[in-house]
């Protein structure tokens, strides 16, 4: 019998020190390199946020201009990737395409032997610039539309909307998406960032680290939840259906997407900020429908004793859903939007891991049988038929 203490899901375990992100799960606060994320999202831009995460401080105007210029210059994907795009099934999930395309970037990285921090920052900039293009290329190609050339005049969020929808976005929509990207840019050692760090801790390359992260992000317990929230809102359709639909789900023992968090025991600060930004954006568009419905879902869900007793509040994915949908992001591009944002955080963590690496290799406590003999195959007893794979 093992006597090891097991921390299933690594719940509450600290595996390293980091200067990137601080989460106060009891007070519901989140800081990027010491700056409250709500201040950043109200006042800053995604470009500034990425710079902050990679350098540990906000840029000066001159630094930001140079950084943004490089980001714009990097808005192109290797031509050979288009061949890949054609081969990909049209009904594939867009996040699968992103993951595969990022993995391919390892093979076309001409300076792959350069593992300096400067080279990792250069790759980070390329990644940030290219992910929107990958999402847009996949989305437009499956709909039989040509790829839109990026605008050098638009910032990151505005250009992202432009190349997906083909229309120059309203400033309010671009600002709402920019704020979403800032809020989602980083969140400590969440499952996908941890995957990235595990991969890079073997001294594997930068893009392999990001590909690992994207595979992890895809799951419904992580980055897939924003899409599930919107599916729920679409299924509910009208305000009067909220209560019966939610109560049916709970009676069937289903989880409500967009509620609960491993770290926050009070409301997720990003959810608080997203409520404010939804409010602001929808006061401009006057299209409150999905946001109103989300608020009603929250009211019904939070009135349930289980959600109060277990501190299950809306998380970042909950109010992301009406915001993304209302600015014009197609439903199955919600998780890719999360990836576009979190790429800033993945890059910061990869840079930090390469700077001070130690192979990540936890252990497990063995609970299986011990000291069994090797039985020759013709002496083994018949057991219930097992599948032959
Ligand atoms: C985020 C999440 C995975 C955190 O999981 P966790 O810390 O491992 O918490 P657990 O799965 O142990 O859940 C603890 C309890 O709360 C309940 N719970 C957690 N989230 C719930 C939800 N969204 N709806 C209903 N019940 C929920 C569980 O059923 C469990 O109840 P029990 O103790 O009676 O069995 C979980 O809250 C969840 O599945 N949320 C929905 C998906 C989601 O929004 N993911 C995005 C996260 S940012």
Image (spheres, rainbow, N blue to C red):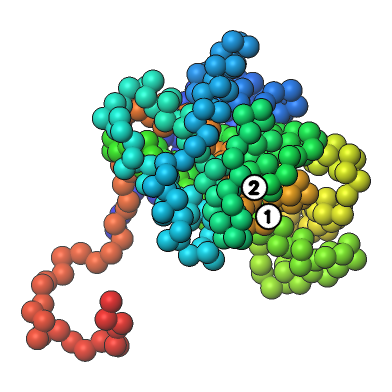
Instruction: Say which mark, if any, is on residue 330.
Output: 1
In primary-sequence order, the first of circles 1 and 2 is 2
Check mark 2 vs ligand 1: CB closer than 8 Å? yes or no: no
Q: Residue at coordinates 37% horizontally, 36% vertically from top-left? A: 206
The image quarter in which residue 25 lies: top right
Would you identify the image quadrant in which residue 349 lies? top left
- Residue 344, x across and y down, in percent: 53, 33
| Residue 127 left/right relative to 149 | left
**Residue at the image position 45 percent from the left and 50 percent from the top:** 82
Q: Quadrant of the N terminus?
A: bottom left
Judged from the image, the secondary structure of the residue bearing numbered disc 2 is helix
Q: Which residue is mark 2?
A: 164
- Tag 1's secondary structure? loop
* Position of residue 126 in the picture relative to residue 331 (left or right): left
Q: Is residue 277 visible?
A: no
Left/right of residue 66 with respect to residue 249 in the rendered view:
left
Does the closest atom of ligand 1 sit within 8 Å of the Cβ of label 1? no
Q: Which mark is residue 238?
A: none
Q: Position of residue 367 (x, y in %)?
A: 31, 60
Q: Residue at x 68, y 41 (%)?
A: 162
Q: Looking at the image, do the residues carrying marks 1 and 2 touch, with CB atoms under 8 Å apart?
A: yes
Quadrant of the frame with the C terminus: bottom left
Distance of label 1 from label 2 (alpha carbons): 9 Å
């Amino acid at each position: 019998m093992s006597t090891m203490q097991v921390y299933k899901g690594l719940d509450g375990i600290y595996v390293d020190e980091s200067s990137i992100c601080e989460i106060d799960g009891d007070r519901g606060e989140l800081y990027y390199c010491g700056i409250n994320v709500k201040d950043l999202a109200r006042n800053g831009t995604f470009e500034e946020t990425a710079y902050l995460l990679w350098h540990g401080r906000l840029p000066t105007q001159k630094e930001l201009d140079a950084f943004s210029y490089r980001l714009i210059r990097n808005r192109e994907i290797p031509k050979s990737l288009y061949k890949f795009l054609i081969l990909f099934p049209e009904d594939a999930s867009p996040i699968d395409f992103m993951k595969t395309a990022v993995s391919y970037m390892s093979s076309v990285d001409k300076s792959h032997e350069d593992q300096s921090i400067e080279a990792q920052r250069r790759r980070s900039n390329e990644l940030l610039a290219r992910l929107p293009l990958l999402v847009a290329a996949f989305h437009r190609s499956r709909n039989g539309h040509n790829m839109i050339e990026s605008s050098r005049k638009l910032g990151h969020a505005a250009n992202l909307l432009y190349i997906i929808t083909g229309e120059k976005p309203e400033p309010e929509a671009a600002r709402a998406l920019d704020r979403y990207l800032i809020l989602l840019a980083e969140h400590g050692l969440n499952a996908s960032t941890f995957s990235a760090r595990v991969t890079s801790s073997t001294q594997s390359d930068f893009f392999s680290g990001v590909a690992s992260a994207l595979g992890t992000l895809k799951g419904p317990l992580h980055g897939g939840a924003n899409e599930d929230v919107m599916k729920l809102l679409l299924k509910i359709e009208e305000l009067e259906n909220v209560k019966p639909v939610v109560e049916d789900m709970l009676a069937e023992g289903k989880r409500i997407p967009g509620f609960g968090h491993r770290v926050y025991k009070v409301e997720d600060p990003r959810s608080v900020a997203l409520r404010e930004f939804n409010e602001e954006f929808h006061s401009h568009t006057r299209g409150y429908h999905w946001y109103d419905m989300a608020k009603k879902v929250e009211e019904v869900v939070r009135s349930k004793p289980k959600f109060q007793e277990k501190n299950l509040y809306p998380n970042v994915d909950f109010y992301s859903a009406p915001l993304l949908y209302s600015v014009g992001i197609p439903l199955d591009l919600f998780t890719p939007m999360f990836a576009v944002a979190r790429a800033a955080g993945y890059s910061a963590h990869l840079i930090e891991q390469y700077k001070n690496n130690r192979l990540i290799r936890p252990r497990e406590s063995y609970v299986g049988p011990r000291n069994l003999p090797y039985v020759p195959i013709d002496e083994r007893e018949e057991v219930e038929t097992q599948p032959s794979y």
